[in-house]
Structure formats: structure tokens, C-alpha cells
Image (cartoon, rainbow, N blue to C red):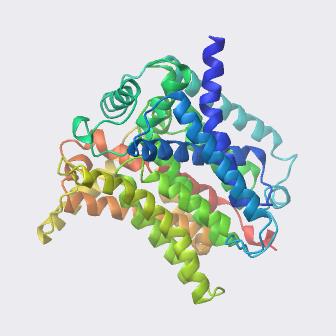
Amino acid sequence: MITDLFFLFTTIAIPTVLGYLAVKSILLNERWPLLVELSISFGLGVGILVLLMFYFNILGLAFSYINILLVVFVAGLILFILYQHIKYSNNSFIDNDDNDTLPFGKMARSRDNEKKHSRLRSYISFFIGLNILTIVWIAMNVPISAWDALATIAFKAKIFYFEKGIPSLELLPHRTYPLLTPLLETWTSFNIGRWDDQLIKIFFPAGLISFLIISYYFLKLLTNKTYALCGIALLLSSNLFFLHATTAYRDSFLLYYNCSAIMFLILWSKYTKTNLLILSSMFASIATFVKLEGTAFMAVYFFVFFVILFFNRKDTAKKKLQLTLIYILPILLCCFSFHIYKSVHGLGISTDGKANLKLSLKNLLLLKNVFRSYSYDLFHSANWGLIWSTFLICFFLYSKRLKRKDVLLTLISIFCFFVLYTLVAIFTENYLWIAGNLKETGRSRLLLHFYPLGVFFITLITFPNPFKYDK
């Protein structure tokens, strides 16, 4: 038992250290709260780890604990040298508008009455802590049992573990799907020295905790401590969000990377720090390696980015071009490297026909069914509680606050995801999973990918007049 706990700790710690070196290379001399730095490090480290496993296996490196550890060590050494070079270089491409760190503490405290809400925060913190402990217990004590978790993830991971590598994609089930979660389970198995249907789920509750911490500090930067805690409590109030944190589905990781990318974009629009833009780009890049939907999400990321850039009157055209390249190139590189790898094996984007286009004006007649399907899931199912009803109430009740940049960008992002999935429903074969006969199994999982943005919108728009605190 103690041995397993130690190896589970190293399973999480190794990619986190790798990610920490990447984070320090991006933040340079900025000091963020340790919890948020470690949470971001976890996300980046996980992405870097699985991409290294993927790329080096293509080059012929067999999977083993020693081989993976060696690759991670070399990558960490390169990141450390890069950090030292950038830190002491006068020509760093990470050119922030100011040298101050983000106001994690001072501004948040100035918005909060410490004594007035201390008891409320204690109750909310207890609720959050109880939910997290329950999720961790369920995740680590119940073996993988859900069909997709077995068929599309664990089965592949087990093959990778025993075959010591990724076999030809044609031999795999769901062979066009990105490989982040199977490779994570493979890495866990090499770390603990065996295949275990329970312990390989360790990254899912760890990812939840990391996401909650990032979300808390995001909300705290834009509101205050009390509102941020309320936002996290609202997140955990969703039955579906809770469920996916305990199962081994890919959707929880897509939610993690997708919403984190949007959060860093919104923060970049407010604080104009290039390191925030880079973090958004890296999380968006990793999202494309989680599920095929991540490829489609590039349209949302790029649209929101260009909206922010368009209304940025301060930067020159040359600076905007530089920012565009910094943001877009890593996402395209990560995304298309996997699709090129699939094409080399004679595979398209998807082998089940889901990506096939059906361009016809007749398809617009399906819009009514799509909207009805959304309405049922958002307001009549047990997936979200009262979150989306509250979203609508807040939208109309506080409509004057929509002019706030953070509120508006969150709303634009939500709208873009709905538009994207609507277009996918009416112009591809995915209508079946969104509004057709299989909608009960697919629709809610698609909405889960951006569900936290709805909670963020509620939290931000109900916060009264933050501008008087801005300097």
C-alpha cells in the first residue's frame, strides 16, 4: 500500500516537475502563488510528457520506465537551460507591458471584507473539500467500468504497456482518436510496475484538483475570494461534472485544457502579458491531443484571440503579427502533427464518417431539433442542476454589465461553442449524437467541454462594479 502511494506520487510529481520548468521559463521573474504555479505545471507537464512519449515512439524508442524517464530528464534539462537563457537575456520574446506580477493578493483583498464573509467562506470551503475527497475516493476505489473508458482508452493503454510502444494505428480500436489519456494510463502503469484498473485513474482526480485551483485563482483575479469560492462550489454542483471527475473518460481532460485555454486568453485581454497568451496557446495545443473535438475548438480559440486583438488599439501591426504567430503556431504544430501521422498510416480525420461534410440548405431544417435537444439537456435534465437557468436569469438581470471585457469574452466563448456544435450537428454525421437517436449518450458530454464557462459567466456578471478597484 505504501509502495503504491509512493509510486502514485512520483507518477504525478515527475510530469509536474517537468511542467514547472516550462512554467518558470514562461513566467521568468514573476512569482505567482505556489498552488497555481503547481496546478499549471501539472497541466503542461502532462501534455509535454505524453507528446514526448508519442514523438519518441515514432522515432523508434520503445516504452519502458527507464526510456521514458531518460527522455523526461533530457527535456527537463533543455527547459532548465532555456529558462536560464531567457531569464538573463535582454532579447526575450516574452515582452510583457510591465514587470509587475498579477495582483493575486493585493487587489483581491481590497475587494473583500475579510471578516464579513469569513464564516460563509468556511462553509463553502468545507463543501468544496468534501466534494473533492468524495471524488478522489470514488475514482481510486472503483475500477474502470464505463464502456468508452474501457474501449477507447484503457484497452489502448494496456496494448501500449504490454507491447512497449504504439503499434500500427490500423490495429487499434478507434484508431483515429488522439492519444493523451491512453498514454497517461500507460505512463502510470510503467510507474507502478504493473497494470491496475484502479490506480491508472490517478490522473483524473488530480486533473480535477488542478483545474479547480486554476479556476479559483482566475475568478479571484477578476472578483474576490468569496465570489471565487462560490464559483468553485457552483462548478461542483453539477452531477455530470462530478461524475466525469470519477470516471476515466477523455471529456474531463478536454474540459480541463479547453477551459484553461479560454481563461488565460481572458486574463491576457485584461493584463496584456505575453506569458498569459503563451499559456493559453500551450493549453489549447494540448487540447487538440485529447479528443478530435479539440481540433474543431481551434476555430473558437482563434476567433476569440482575433476579437481581442482587433480591439487592442495600443499595439502596432508588427506587434500584433508577432502575438498572432506566438499564439497560433504552437496550436497548429501540435494539432497537425498527429493528423499527419494518421495520414501516413492511411487514415483520415475520422474513420467512422463523423467528419464527413453534408453541405445542403436542407440541413437547416434540422436546427429546430438541435435547439430542442440543447434546451432539454440544459434545462430539463439532471446534469447541470440550475446552472443554465441561473445563467439565463443573470444574462437578463445584469445585462448592463455585459460591457465588461471579461464578462463579454466569456459570453462570446460560450456562444462560439454552441455555434460550433450546432454547425457540426447539421452539416456532419454527428447530428445523431447531438439531436438524433444517440443524443442521450453524446450531447451532454459535448456540453460538458465548456460547461465551466457558464459558471464563470454567472460569477463574473454578478460581481458588482469591479472597475473602481482597478488602477
Residue 415 appears anywhere in the view: no
Compared to 57, does 406 lie above or below? below
The residue depicted at 64 percent of the width and 48 percent of the height is 40
Residue 85 occupies quadrant: bottom right
Residue 308 at x, y = what percent? 56, 76
Could you tell me how many numbered marks the image carries? 0
Residue 408 at x, y = what percent? 55, 70
Residue 363 at x, y = what percent? 15, 65
Compared to 364, does 384 lie above or below? above
Furthest-top residue in this view: 1
Classify the position of the N terminus by image quarter: top right
Classify the position of the C terminus by image quarter: bottom right
> Taking 428 as reference, is 100 left or right?
right
Residue 43 at x, y = what percent? 58, 46
Furthest-right residue in this view: 115
Residue 134 appears anywhere in the view: yes
The residue depicted at 36 percent of the width and 33 percent of the height is 153
The residue depicted at 71 percent of the width and 74 percent of the height is 95
The residue depicted at 34 percent of the width and 63 percent of the height is 420
